[in-house]
Structures are given as structure tokens and as C-alpha cells.
Image (spheres, grey):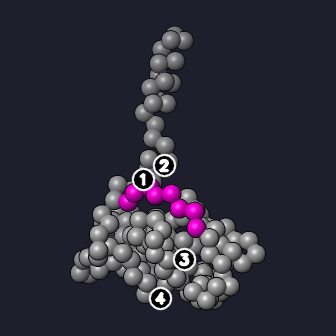
Amino acid sequence: MKASLLLIGLFLLISCESDDNLRRNPNLLNINVNYEVNLSLPQFNNLNFSGNSVYVPGQGNLGLIIVNSGSSFLAWDAADPNIVPNDCSRLIIDGLNAASTCDDPPNEYSLITGQPLVENLRFPLYAYRVTESNGVLRIFN
């Protein structure tokens, strides 16, 4: 009896999928990001005002999109999560939305929620963690 309960428990443990596996996106690489943004620098001045966003190249898959939502700062990978990264899959900021140019109509996402604004898209935007201290944002995963 104990052996069968142990086997059932072991089977359930092995067959369970972790949250990381459920969130893994096969289109994007898991690239280590650890980037700091000084909000007093001119290139990041827009982030001092609610509803603005900034594109930062050279980080993540195709850069970062950093957003001031009004209540917090958000950071997203600038690669369309539903397309393998290529020239047209970098998201272009349009207000509080962003879209890639690969398809017509384009894949479009909310920069506040990260959710797709087009039906039948499987993955939301890839989010990074953001902390703020003394006017400096730290963006990391």
C-alpha cells in the first residue's frame, strides 16, 4: 500500500509542469537582461510623464520598450512574441500600443497589459521586472 502511494505521488510530481514551462515562449530566446535607466538623462525624459514609452536597442531579443503607465513602470521585450525574431518583428511604439510590421493587419499589443489586441495570437508580450530607486530604473529578468 505504501509503495503504491509512493509511486502515485512520484508520478504526479514528475508529470506536473512548472509555471516556467507554461510561460516559456518558443519564439524568443531567454536572454539575460540587467539594464539601468537614469530618468534624469535626456534620452529617457519622456518616461517622467505618464503614458509615455521609450525604445532601448541592444537589450533582450530585439530591444526593450519601457513604459510609464501612470502608476508604475513596465518593461517589455521589443520582439513580437508570436513571430521568430527577424527584421519586421521588432515592435514599433504607437501611443500605448505596439505593433510588428510582418503581417497585414499587424500583430498589435497593449503596452499597459502586454496582451494581444488581435485575435488568435498565442503569446502576450514578454515582460521584464522593473524596480525604481532614486530616479533610476533597474530592468532585469
Circle 2/circle 1 CB separation < 8 Å? yes
Q: Nearer the viewer, mark 3 or mark 4?
A: 3
Residue 63 appears in view:
yes
Prevailing SS of the magenta stretch: loop
Provide the residue span drawn in magenta. Answer: 28-35
Give the amino acid type for the residue marked by disc 2 in the picture: Asp
The residue at the point 53 percent across, 62 percent down is: 33
Q: Nearer the viewer, mark 3 or mark 1?
A: 3
> In the image, is residue 135 part of the stretch drawn in magenta?
no
The residue at the point 41 percent across, 76 percent down is: 109
> Quadrant location of residue 117?
bottom left
Look at mark 3 in the image and give the residue it sits on: 66
Give the amino acid type for the residue marked by disc 3 in the picture: Ile
Give the CA distance from mark 4 to mark 1: 28 Å
Look at mark 2 in the image and give the residue it sits on: 20
Circle 2/circle 4 CB separation < 8 Å? no
Circle 4/circle 1 CB separation < 8 Å? no
**Mark 3 vs mark 1: which is more N-terminal?**
1
